[in-house]
Image (cartoon, helix red, strand yellow):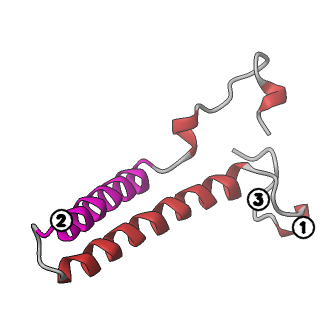
Amino acid sequence: RYSDRLGFEQVPMIDDLYSDRLAAADGALVAFGTVTLLLARAGVLPDDAVVAGGVLLAAGLVVFTANLVGVVYRHGRVLPERLRSHPENAD
């Protein structure tokens, strides 16, 4: 959508496209989930922590996917025009 506008007008930067709050949440969930899983598998945490780590990691991946889908929905041409909720050039 923006490639033909480069050099002719302002286009959004990558970090302008996604939600910073969702990115922070998914980063924290993935990091805590991974650390919890690794520590539980290493025997440092009890075996029940494997489930908690897996849930945190899965939640982080769901939040990441939601953020990515939101970017594609808002800025990509993935829906026919009649299904769009706003005009193409609306800001």
Q: How many marks?
A: 3
Tell me where the magenta segment starts and ends, as one range: 20-43
Report the mark closest to the observer, 2 or 3: 2
Q: Secondary structure at mark 1?
A: helix
Give the percent coordinates (x, y) of residue 78.
81, 58
Which residue position is annotated with label 3?
Answer: 86
Residue appearing at x 11%, y 71% in the figure? 45
Quadrant (top left, top right, bottom left, bottom right) of the C terminus: top right
Taking the view exactly as shown, the residue that stands out farthest to the top is 7
Q: Amino acid at mark 3?
A: His
Residue appearing at x 34%, y 76% in the figure? 55
Distance in Å between CA atoms under marks 2 and 1: 53 Å
Residue 11 vs 18, above or below: the answer is above
Q: Earlier in the sequence, mark 2 or mark 1?
A: 2
Q: Residues within 10 Å of mark 2 (few under 14, many from 20)?
A: few
Q: Residues within 10 Å of mark 3 (few under 14, many from 20)?
A: few
Q: Amino acid at mark 2?
A: Ala
Q: Which mark is residue 82?
A: 1
Give the percent coordinates (x, y) of residue 1.
80, 40
**8 and 28: which is toward the camera:** 28
Q: Secondary structure at mark 2?
A: loop
**65 and 5: which is toward the camera:** 65
Q: Quadrant of residue 40?
A: bottom left
- Describe residue 56's horizontal placement relative to residue 90 as left or right: left
Q: Earlier in the sequence, mark 2 or mark 3?
A: 2
Residue 84 vs 88, above or below: the answer is below
Q: Which mark is residue 42?
A: 2
Residue appearing at x 90%, y 67% in the figure? 82
Residue appearing at x 41%, y 71% in the figure? 58
